[in-house]
Amino acid sequence: MAVDNPILQGSAVGQNVVQRKSWLGRNWKWLLGGTFLTLVAFGAGIFALIMSWMRGSDVAQEAVTRAQSNPAMTQRLGARIDEGWLMSGSINVGTGGSGDAEVVVPVSGPRGNANIYVIAHKIAGTWNYNQILAVVESSGERIDLLRGPQPVVSQGPAAATQAAQNSTVAYVPPIPQPSVAAPAASPAGGSDTIQSQDTNVQGVVGELIQCRRAAGVLSVKIRFHNTTGAGMGFYALPPLAGYERYYLAAANKKYFILKDTDGTYLAQGFSWDCGQSGVCEKLGAGQSITWWAKFPAPSADVTKLDLFTPVTPPFEDVPIADN
């Protein structure tokens, strides 16, 4: 008996059925490229927001304002000094109003560019500046902006007197301030040594040589002496440390280093002489450097005090000399 095999209408014999790709399969390259561009744009936006926040911070604005008002800076860069865009560093502020900042602020003018290196600490909502140092790119010249406006060229005693009259006056009574002495040979344990302590650097001794009270101000000097036969760099104040690490204790009170009206500590200034920002000097074999600072004086009935530093054990029961 014959069996009929009906032919299915519309069928294709011997042909493979081609499946159509999904949308993702057809457009994955475009999707990948779009995702990449979106991430780049997002990252650039976040970066721009961070730069904008840092440029508008009190720390950056203080650096730019000081640069714009400093005669040496306007002479090197030109009368118009503007803040650059690409800052670096960090600004950290806690919920209690305290924090720290270490940033590099680029500035430029018609005659050139400079970077301003700022180190500051915030205490109780107020920024205290340890360093605002400008470095001119073309010459490498360093300009200390914490010193306030200074004449670019000194022209003898008359010019120095006039500059002193025009400079910012500290809120303490005017006192002749010692200059920062260059390292010079000095025997350890000299006749002027009140008390001596080893420092945190082997071979360097700290000798307290002055603790004098006059006109409501107490002047302190410490001679740091290299007792070794080799040269070295010595930090009287280590990098990233603040001058609040130096203080006096007397009659159950603490006394910190005084500042002038610009917020500058009345103490030896910061430098980059040892490769990092700090209070540092390069001492040759047998050489010494004298560190100095001005503190508010304890009352006249206080005759002894303790001096705390970040590089030595405390100097204890130090007698106060009165002028």
Image (cartoon, rainbow, N blue to C red):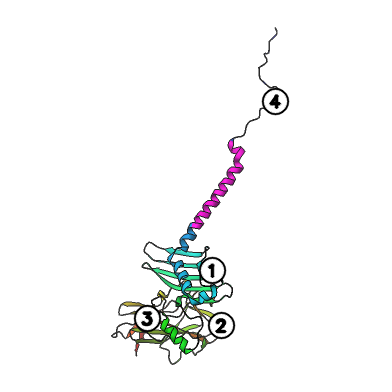
Crowd tier of the residue under label 1, counting other residues whose Cα lies within 10 Å: few below 14, some 14–19, many 20 or above: some
Crowd tier of the residue under label 4, counting other residues whose Cα lies within 10 Å: few below 14, some 14–19, many 20 or above: few
Q: If you read the primary sequence from the N terminus, does the residue marked by circle 1 or circle 4 appear first?
A: 4
Looking at the rendered structure, the kind of residue marked 1 is Ser
Looking at the rendered structure, the kind of residue marked 4 is Gln
Magenta span main SS: helix
Residue at image position (55%, 52%) is 40
Residue 156 x/y as whole percent: 49, 88
Q: Is residue 156 left or right of residue 31?
A: left
Q: Which mark is residue 281?
A: none
Asked whether residue 201 is in view, the answer is no
Label 3: element kind = strand
Residue 20 x/y as whole percent: 62, 32
Q: Quadrant of the C terminus?
A: bottom left
Residue marked by disc 3: 295
Q: Is residue 306 left or right of residue 235?
A: left
What is the distance, in whole Å, between disc 1 and disc 2 at their CAs?
A: 38 Å
What is the distance, in whole Å, between disc 2 and disc 4 at their CAs?
A: 91 Å
Q: If you read the primary sequence from the N terminus, does the residue marked by circle 3 or circle 1 appear first?
A: 1
Q: If you read the primary sequence from the N terminus, does the residue marked by circle 2 or circle 4 appear first?
A: 4
In the rendered image, the vertical position of residue 156 relative to residue 114, given as above or below: below
Looking at the rendered structure, the kind of residue marked 2 is Gly
Residue marked by disc 1: 108
Q: Are marks 4 and 3 in contact (CB under 8 Å)?
A: no
What is the distance, in whole Å, between disc 1 and disc 4 at their CAs?
A: 74 Å
Residue 45 sits inside the magenta stretch: yes
In the rendered image, the vertical position of residue 1 relative to residue 29, given as above or below: above
Residue marked by disc 4: 15
Residue 254 x/y as whole percent: 34, 77
Label 2: element kind = loop
Residue marked by disc 2: 231
Q: If you read the primary sequence from the N terminus, does the residue marked by circle 1 or circle 2 appear first?
A: 1
